[in-house]
Image (tube, helix red, strand yellow):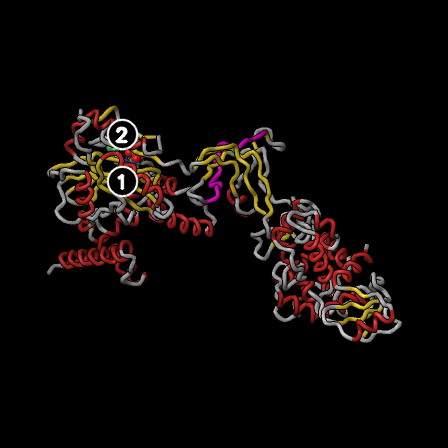
Amino acid sequence: MSGFEAARERVEALRREIEAHNRAYYELDAPTVSDAEYDALFRELQALEATHPELAAPDSPTKRVGGKPLAQFAEVRHDVPMLSIQTETDTGPNGAAQFDARVRRELELADDAAAVEYSAELKFDGLAVSLRYEHGVFVRGATRGDGVTGEDVTQNLRTVRDIPLRLAGDAPPLLEVRGEAYMRRDDLARYNEKARARGEKPLVNPRNGAAGSIRQLDPAVAAARPLKFFAYGVGALAGWRPPATHAALLDTLAAFGLPVCEHRAVVKGWRELADFHDRMGAQRAAIPFDFDGVVYKVNSLALQERLGFRSREPRWAVAHKYPAEEARTVVDAIDVQVGRTGALTPVAKLRPVFVGGVTVTNATLHNEDEARRKDVRVGDTVIVRRAGDVIPEVVAVVAEARPMQASAHDMFAQEPLHPPFALPETCPQCGSRVVREEGGAIARCSGGLVCPAQVKGALLHFAGRRAMDIEGLGDKLVEQLTAGGQVKTPADIYMLDVPTLAALERMGEKSAENLAAAIEKSKQTTLARFVFALGIRNVGETTAKDLARHFGKLENLMRADAAQLETVPDVGPVVAESLVDFFAEPHNREVIERLRAAGVRWPESEGQVDAPPGPLAGKVFVLTGTLPTLKRDEAKAMIEAAGGKASGSVSKKTDYVLAGEEAGSKLEKARELDIPILNEAEFIKLLEGAKL
Ligand code: IVH
């Protein structure tokens, strides 16, 4: 065998092997070799083709990597024009009915004639291209252009792995395949992530991504883009008789190894067309690529020929659209919303625009980084997207439409009328300082106890069983108390009196009294519960206990800096930062002071030592029997918290006897000595009354 013969055999073997690896990798998603082995095969083939130019072939896998950048695209005249397609804008079932009625009229079918058969498929949202195969080999790819003349984008299309460089089976001498180059949404997202990491501009959406990639002069750029292809028809043909129907034609293209979308159906009559439209519409979010409608084509190629064309559109096809998921509008303002956890979200206020089936006036910008990355400013024209039930979002700014003004520094220059977006330094709801969490992506209001956006959650947490344990203060009451303005911070809970509570909806005198008693009771707590109740971000029950044990006194905890906080077991930089931010906010400190002034206390706290004399200062109580709700210890703690004393036996020095059921000798003794006897409700009233 000559050296040349050996080279030819090796080249052919390499091509077969590389194509097999390509199929395994791109079509079956199951790689059969390592990247390094693949690269070695590929380089060997490239080297052989370079030393033996006569062995070069248009369908060699080496052609996939793209050649030299072009100065401009060459023109391509389409032998068979690339037509456009009539659009049915009625997105309801009527759209299908109108098309079917038109077809029947043109075919002069009687009303009782059989239903017309259609091929129904998706209307892909990418770029139309034409692929020319001569004797099964891909020789030229072109864009649609104006339909008559397009651009030669062969180099770029060769890099699309989906597009076979050689057709399978018995390919005709000439076959022009028409179809759509597109990008999957997940591929686009992955590509954009990498592009951003490299500091490059991301692609706006799959359609722009596909169109922009195909029209790249540098094929290496196109090669790096995750493009795909679906065949949906044919153009010029020679030496081949296509099958009788469009559906069979698509099957044949698939058999040649061309990708044909699986979401298609052969149906009869307009109702089945409308069903297909509905069915695909419902799957729109689940299908990994964008399609903006469905396309109906008269299935019989003979009938297609009879129907013919009107100007540039065939009478045998129609695009039945879905409500657009993207639209353009103008940003009137950028508001900042505060969520239940204090997270700040910039929201674009839009000129009302109909998109995704509804009128949209707001679109989220997610966070400050996102708003800055997209560089959305007041006055900008933006592309808004609303897909399915997803919250509307700003996809991109239309750069050319940004309002400009003469530059203040350079009379010949223009500068944007509005500055880049920035979040405020203080919370728009409560004026507390805005802090950034580790990593910085999320900005949060630090006024957890006072911020109206956060107060409901804060109150429910504060009153919770493991926190201050205010029995009966649940969802509905918190809703009423915050809506009515009676409670703005947790400290306000301790300002509520029975008449105020009784005036609330569905609240009788008795429940009001019970709630007042529960509120009163909650004042006696522990430092750990109190710290937990404050709802400091990242401070759960266990951390609160550790902090209480470590610092002993609230004042010490409030004064601690991050380094001191981090000496506590399990307190890392994130928790420490949350604590420092929380206690640094004057609004929060004020609420804490008010809570303590209202009588919230815990054993062995500094506050208890130099607390002002409580409402029961100096009073001596004796407890006897079982109280309806309070446990003995709790009642005792309440007495002590209010400055009183609990004694074990009744004497002349006893001021009150607090008696429950099955009270025995102590009760009798009290009666003898004429000492006032209280039941639980009266006791609570006394605490209340004494306070007022
Ligand atoms: S058929 C004779 N089928 O729609 C009609 N077009 O055609 C020729 N498009 O930009 C086109 N999906 O790229 C046909 N399943 C489909 C299609 C489709 C998308 C695009 C096509 C062109 C526009 C008008």
Q: Residue at x 81, y 72 (%)?
A: 668
Residue 570, image x and y in percent? 61, 69
Distance, label 1 to label 2, CA atoms, is: 15 Å
Q: Nearer the viewer, residue 446 or 479?
A: 479
Identify residue for label 1: 121
Give SS at disc 1. strand
Q: Which mark is residue 250?
A: none
Q: Is residue 181 left or right of residue 244?
A: right
**Residues tagged 1 and 2 counted as in contact (Cβ below 8 A):** no
Q: Residue at x 68, y 66 (%)?
A: 528
Report if residue 463 lies within the magenta region: no
Q: Is residue 586 above or below residue 239?
A: below
Q: Mark 1 near ligand 1 (CB under 8 Å)?
A: yes
Q: Nearer the viewer, residue 586 or 503?
A: 503
Q: Residue at x 79, y 75 (%)?
A: 665
Q: Nearer the viewer, residue 250 or 674?
A: 674
Residue 276, image x and y in percent? 29, 40
Q: Which class describes the residues within 10 Å of circle 2: few (<14), some (14-19), or many (20+)?
A: many
Give SS at disc 2. helix
**Region in magenta:** 390-405
Residue 102 picture quarter: top left
Residue 346 picture quarter: top right
Report if residue 402 lies within the magenta region: yes
Give the residue type that dot 2 points to. Phe
Identify residue for label 2: 99
Q: Is residue 425 visible?
A: no
Give the residue type that dot 1 points to. Glu
